[in-house]
Amino acid sequence: NVRPHIMFPAIHDSQVVAYSADSRSGKVELVLRAGPQDDDPLLRLVFSGVAAHQFEHPLMPSWVFGLEEIASDALLKREWQSLQEGHRLTGWPGHWAVSLDKAAAFCAEHGLKGFDLESSYGFDGWVLAQSVELIGGA
C-alpha cells in the first residue's frame, strides 16, 4: 500500500523508462511506464525550476515506489556533505552552495522544495525544484 503522504499514487510500481535533465529549461523529466506490459500507458514526471538533482547509481530498468515532497532545508541538511563535495570538485550544483546558510537562502528566495524519489527497485534520488507535475496520469 502507498503511504498517504506520497505524491501521485499513480506512479507507484511504475517502471522508469528514461530520464533526462535540461539545463537550459531547468527541467528534469522521468518517463515512466504505468505497468509491466509494453502497451501500458506512459507517464511523465516533470520537475521545473530545478536547481539540483541526484540519482545515485540508477539501475535500469527500475521501479518507482513513490515521490515525497520535503522541506528544502531538510534536503540540504541531509545532502550537505554530497553538495559540499560536488561544489569543491566541480562547482556543482552552483554558486549558491558555498555554505549551508547561503544554500538555504537561495532555496527560500527561489521557492525551491525538496522531492525524494523512492524506488521499489533500482532508482533512488532527490530533486531540488520549484514544482513537479505528472503528465498522463490520474
Image (cartoon, rainbow, N blue to C red):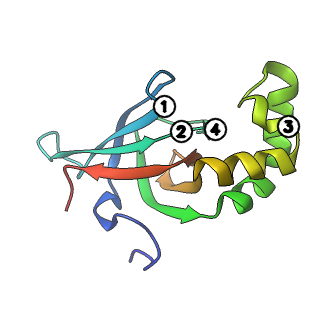
Q: Nearer the viewer, mark 4 or mark 1?
A: 1
Mark positioned earlier in the residue sequence (2 or 4): 2
- In the depicted structure, whether residue 34 falls above or below residue 26: below
Question: What is the CA distance from the residue labelled 2 to the residue labelled 3?
Answer: 18 Å
Q: Determine the CA span between mark 1 and mark 2.
A: 5 Å
Q: What number is the disc on residue 26?
A: 1
Which is nearer the N-term, disc 4 or disc 3? Answer: 4
Q: Circle 3 sits on which residue?
A: 84
Depth check, front residue: 120 or 126: 126
Q: How far across and how far down the image is residue 138, in percent?
A: 19, 62
Q: Which of marks 1 and 2 is nearer the N terminus?
A: 1
Residue 20 drawn above or below residue 67: above
Which of marks 3 and 1 precedes in the sequence?
A: 1
In what element is the residue under mark 4? loop
CA–CA distance between discs 2 and 4? 17 Å
Tag in front: 1 or 3: 1
Front residue (pair 34, 128)? 128
The image quarter in which residue 46 lies: top left
Q: In which quarter of the image is residue 47?
A: top left
Mark 1–mark 3 Cα distance, whole angstroms, equals 21 Å
The quadrant where residue 98 appears: top right
Q: Mark 2 points at which residue?
A: 50
- Image point 38% across, 39% down: which residue? 30
Question: Quick one: label 2, few (<14), some, or many (20+) residues within 10 Å?
Answer: many
Q: Which of marks 2 and 3 is in front?
A: 2
**CB atoms of marks 1 and 2 within 8 Å:** yes
Which mark is drawn over residue 56? 4
